[in-house]
Image: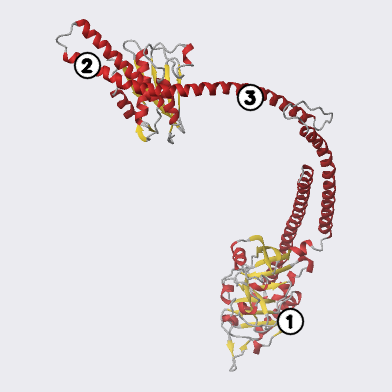
Amino acid sequence: MNIREQLIFFFSLVIIFSVGLSAFFAISYTESGVITAEFAKMETHNSEIMHDIETLHQRASEDLVFTLKNPLFVEYFELPETKAGNNYDENGVLQFTPKQQEIKKDLEQWVYHFQNKFQVDETCVIDFTGQEHARLVLSKIETNENLSPDEETSPFFEPSFMKQKDEVHVQYPYVSPDTNRWVFAYTSPVELGSGQKPAIYHFEIPMTTFSDLLDVHVDDGRVYVLDPQGFVVADSANPISDTVLSIDPVSHFPPFQSVFADGNSEILNKMNSNDVGSGTYVVNGVEHVFVYEHLSTFDWILVHDKSVSSILVGNTTVENLIFTIGIVATTVSIIGVFSVIIISSRITRPIIQLANEISSENPERLESISTTNHETAQITHSVNDLIKKMNDYQEEIHVKNQELTIQKSQLEKLAKVGELASKLTHNLRTPLTVIKVAADLLQLQNKDTLDKRSIEKLERIQSASTNLEKQIESVLTYVREKPLELVETKITDLIADTLQNMDLPNTLSINSKNTENYIQCDADKLQVVLMNIISNASDALKENGVITIDSDTSNHDVQIHVSDDGPGIPSENLSKIFDSLFTTKSTGTGLGLPYCKSVIEQHGGSLSVSQNPTTFTISLPKKTISKKTE
């Protein structure tokens, strides 16, 4: 794939991906904004329904208290015959005196008007024994024979007597035995001037009145009321039937799973744990959103549920916006791809021309390239710079080749000289040993007969032999390179072993510090290196000289510093001290420091020198790999 095709392919992908991603986020943010707005709308709708429910309870309570304001209630129960207790005939029917009957009739008419004003199923007056004194069922006044004496078993009986005057008890829904349907009960005590509570006033409202408050338009989703126990007490989508299936609410009302088909109990737990909230769930691949809020009555939960598809589908503004975004994204992508094709052709044409000119260059004689194209001017300039550098490098390489040829010739000569020197020094050791032993024997056997002059001559022979032997050993040591035998060595022990093998002047001071570090090295070879450096320092010092040995570490290296307070190395000799055969000593071979450098480099380290004071620095890696030689 050439550069033009790569440009078209790459930038087309970038454009399509960028536009598609932008369109995706635009649609996502649009949907998110619509859903967020719908959440707020659903919460507002919930607030309106809650207000209606609260108004229902408040109005029922106020009307109940208002009805009790009629003095006929107090007048009836202040009658002596009422206070005397209930009187029954042989059939167990409650008997009333004419005065009781008169007040009771007026009271029933008062309640009758109230019951017609408000949607009330049943109204009754019950004394503290559980005896009904009046009851109206569906606006029908019951006869005395139908008044129940057993209302103390009603769920609202005891809680009602615990209320104070003008306080209302709202009873959890139950099945009314008189209307045979689910009702709410509102009760409040009748209180006499003495503070006694001889009776309660009670009426019932059908649950259908409550359910009617949940009526919503089909486009507004579904509104229902959940009991904390996990069943639906009211539902806008599926109104609860008036037919009593069971007097147990858990058995009568639909279960929680009827609205959350996946049976996700975590959602119910979340609703029970929080007074207000919202969330989402998925049923049969359809995503739903919901908001909820707890009612003040029975801790019921008002829930507004709506599918996401019903929020977005059918919403003309969102559909049009998504369609418009899709058209714009497609159009921009097509225009972008065609633009990339045209631009890539314009970009690549001068590059191809430049490439052709470069390919036609003679590699043995590179010449500058000329171009009038503005797009490739900078590339052409860079290529010409490169050509110039390559010509310069070719010239330098030619010179270096000549130098390397000369150096190779010199190295071959040095190798032969080294080989000859190795053989020569090896051959000299035997006669030199004979001379040394002979001189020692002459001196030992004739020490009593030799004169002073002869003894001095023998000592000169011995000294010269020893010096020559050292020089031969130095040459052999430099020529031979044995493999390293690496061991973990403490610098302190290495210095101690080195100094023990040296004969240093008593006036010389050796100071060691920070030498507790460990190094991995060939201890014997490193001792020779230290002996050479310390010996050179000792030779350069005057009386009372000081040699300091110090060490430090970095991430990868351990460094040993050997410094002295001597006069230092002349600057003209500083760059030559590691050259083979360079020496300033009359009896030196010029191989000591080169050998030291060779040993350190064999360890993978380096040997360097600095001035003021004169300091030799041995730098060794913390982990040395032996460079074995055959």
Residue 359 vs 220, above or below: the answer is: above
Give the residue type that dot 3 points to: Ile
Tell me where residue 165 appears, x and y as whole percent. Answer: 61, 69
Q: Nearer the viewer, mark 1 or mark 2?
A: 2
| Circle 2: element type | helix
Q: Residue at x 82, y 54 (%)?
A: 326
Q: Nearer the viewer, residue 557 or 293?
A: 557
Residue in view at x 18 percent, y 6 percent:
451
Please name the residue that numbered disc 1 is placed on: 139
Figure quadrant of residue 136: bottom right
Q: Position of residue 521 (x, y in %)?
A: 38, 32
Q: Of the two numbered discs 3 and 1 on the same chain, state the one appearing first in sequence.
A: 1
Q: Nearer the viewer, residue 617 or 212?
A: 617
Q: Where in the figure is residue 185, as x and y percent of width and height?
A: 65, 75
Circle nearer the N terminus (1, 2): 1
Amino acid on which the number 2 mark rests in the picture:
Asp
Q: Which residue is mark 2?
A: 440
Q: Secondary structure at mark 3?
A: helix
Q: Quadrant of residue 52?
A: bottom right
Residue that mark 3 sits on: 397
The answer to whether residue 473 is seen in the rendering is no
Where residue 79 sits in the image (x, y, percent)?
61, 79
Report which quarter residue 132 is drawn in: bottom right
Left or right: 3 with respect to 84?
Answer: right
The answer to whether residue 448 is left or right of residue 622 is: left
- Residue at left offset 76%, top offset 64%: 309
Residue flagged by tag 1: what amino acid is it? Ser
